[in-house]
Image (cartoon, grey):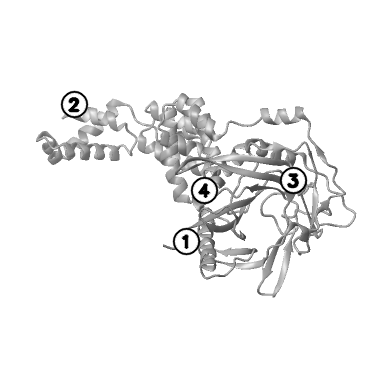
Amino acid sequence: MGKQYETVIGLEVHVELATKTKIFCGCSTAFGGAPNTHTCPVCTGMPGTLPVLNKQVLEYAVSVGLAANCEITRYSKFDRKNYFYPDNPQNYQISQLYLPICQNGYVEIETEDGVKRIGIHEIHMEEDAGKLIHDEWEDCTLVDYNRSGVPLIEIVSEPDMRNAQEVIAYLEKLRLLIQYLGASDCKLQEGSMRADVNLSVREAGTERLGTRTEMKNLNSFRAITRAIEGERERQIELLESGEEVVQETRRWDDTKGCSYAMRSKEDAQDYRYFPDPDLPPVRIEEAWLEKLRAALPEFRTEKIERYRREYDIPDYDIEILTGSKRLADLFEETVSLCREPKKVSNWLMGETMRLLKEKGMEPEELAFSPAHLAALIEMTDKKEINGTVAKEVFEVMFETDTDPRRYVEEKGLKTVNDTAALQKILEKVIADNPQSVEDYRNGKQKALGFLVGQTMKAMQGKADPALVNQMLREML
């Protein structure tokens, strides 16, 4: 029997905050934009410029800290982390080492063995660096400083995770807390949430931590899972063959499914940190902190409890709806307008989910308004339109948030409830299909379905199928 190994994982998660402007200047933080257009002397590190802290960054950082059960540092400072790199315009990054804004917190995750607490060592504020673009054609490197100075918080966990499932559960938990706060959209694919994985292995049962490596370049849950499995195996193989694990930073290549060394891991002293002389310390008063605490939203766990109490919908629906802030908001606002929780949930769980999947979209991108969904439900309830028409209208609404009432009016899709007109059509359908009429009278139920179909076709789908069914039975 070979040795049993335990994996020990801690994460450093960088989250880009959803402020309109950068952390120390007034430049736009919008994603995209032509290179070097969202810049000014401050965020391009011109000599003699002075940074000024964006208050909204502090509010978001403290709110995330409160949501993650952290102690909020009443007197915190900014430090300079010195390193030379072309995308780092001042040749230092303004961060927090000695007195970070939040410390000693935790979040709880669901695992196979029940609820587990993952410790949060600290959360600090810092600025992002620019972006290097390597031009193969010209054989040169270009730099874009649009991202330079975009506000980040870095959430550093304790090494409390033991496998990829726990890591993903922890990231999901953080992502939902932060999205519910509105502090960031946390899109991994756009880089507004980035995770670096610190991983080491040790023999099961030992207390001492093994040598850790840090893995970067992980921009999807799938990449993170694969990187963890891959690095665990690599380290175990080294130990089994009597070699040592080297402390280093590695880059994960998801297409090749392997990692390679980037640089030997530096320690804090390599960065020559010192307090930033241009930024005053941040003092936080109790009253301001209480105001932020009172403004915290209802998070997912409380939402789930309330939905169970207030709405008569299945637990599965509740899990899905609360799993996205946008879906939960849509659900609640639509219900407040039409008072039909089950029907709203059906539209969101059915057609909405189907179209999201078909178009490869995230719930956060949904554009239709609660008022329009409520109107569609009401029209269907009042039998102003039938189910088939409702689905057609919904597809248009999903794309362009069209007003369903206007669309039905313009396209002439209203259900025809004029029994006299329907009677005429039915008489014609019965006359044109003697064989089906015969079959129905001989007890073949399927024949009725065929006749209903023919009627709907003649009515261009604008009849109430239940009414057609009822009238047909009576006439036959």
Q: Which residue is mark 1?
A: 3
Tell which of 248 and 473 is nearer to you.
248
Of marks 3 and 4, the one in the foreground: 4
Q: Residue 295, how many percent across, how many down?
A: 66, 29
The amino acid sitting under disc 3 is Thr
Of marks 3 and 1, the one in the foreground: 1
Q: Residue 166, how many percent across, how many down?
A: 51, 48
Comes first in the chain, label 4 or label 1: 1
Q: In the displayed structure, would residue 211 be above or below residue 106?
A: below
Mark-to-mark CA distance, 3 and 1 = 53 Å
The amino acid sitting under disc 1 is Lys
Q: Which residue is mark 2?
A: 474
Comes first in the chain, label 2 or label 1: 1
The amino acid sitting under disc 2 is Glu
Q: Which residue is mark 3?
A: 21
Mark-to-mark CA distance, 4 and 2 = 62 Å
| Residue 263 in sight in this render | yes
Q: Is residue 316 left or right of residue 98?
A: left
